[in-house]
Amino acid sequence: MNDLIARYEEQGLTLTMNEETMIALCQRPAPRARLGVKNEFHVRYRTVERMFEACAEFIDNRIAVKKYREDQKVAQKIKAVQLAAAVKVGDIFVDSWGYEQTQVDLYQVVAKPTAKTVIVREIACETVEGSEGHMCRNVRAVPNAFVGEEMKKRLDNYGGFKTSSYSCARPTTAEAEHYNSWYY
């Protein structure tokens, strides 16, 4: 029993078990709570053995979830570094945005001063022949056909960058087609 209580304390939890009433109570500190603690569980069991088993399962699961989250965080950081390293001068990014219409902005990397910082310029797009419809079309990037000023952008964890508060640009290729629609 003392081993189990010690494992709970390592995780910042308080475990109280009453073998006579077969009630287990687990609390965690919560400074904003009225009593300063919140209950994780407060359960009465049919047998003492089941009480010990359930308390052990709870802490094992909590430790496993904590370890999984830490591993995922490390894996995400590694992936972000790899995605940032893969971006090079000349790469093209697409930003597709709009409400009830789909606007397409294309950007080309013109410099990469640091590992996660890029200098981009907006580039022109051309209509894909045969894709025109009623107020819609498919477009393709025209590399080195710059139409905008240079912008300094920070690469995010997914290999792209924010272009505005509501939109992000993601990697694409010059051959890729992107749907574009508008209203008059």
Image (spheres, rainbow, N blue to C red):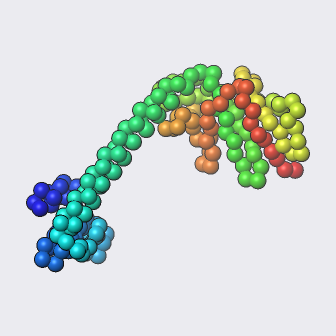
Please tell me whether residue 110 is drawn above or below residue 153 in the rendered image.
Answer: above
Taking the view exactly as shown, the residue that stands out farthest to the bottom is: 21
Asked whether residue 32 appears in the rendered view, the answer is yes
Please tell me whether residue 179 is drawn above or below residue 42 in the rendered image.
Answer: above
Which of the 4 quarters of the picture holds residue 34? Answer: bottom left
Whole-percent x, y for residue 58 in the image = 27, 60
* Front-lying residue, 141 or 130: 130
Asked whether residue 150 appears in the rendered view, the answer is no
Please tell me whether residue 175 is drawn above or below residue 38 in the rendered image.
Answer: above
Whole-percent x, y for residue 166 in the image = 62, 49
Q: Residue at x 87, y 50 (%)?
A: 184
Left or right side of 95 for 6: left
Left or right side of 75 for 63: left
Whole-percent x, y for residue 13 in the image = 22, 61
* Front-lying residue, 110 or 76: 76
Q: Residue at x 78, y 41 (%)?
A: 180
Q: Residue at x 26, y 73 (%)?
A: 43
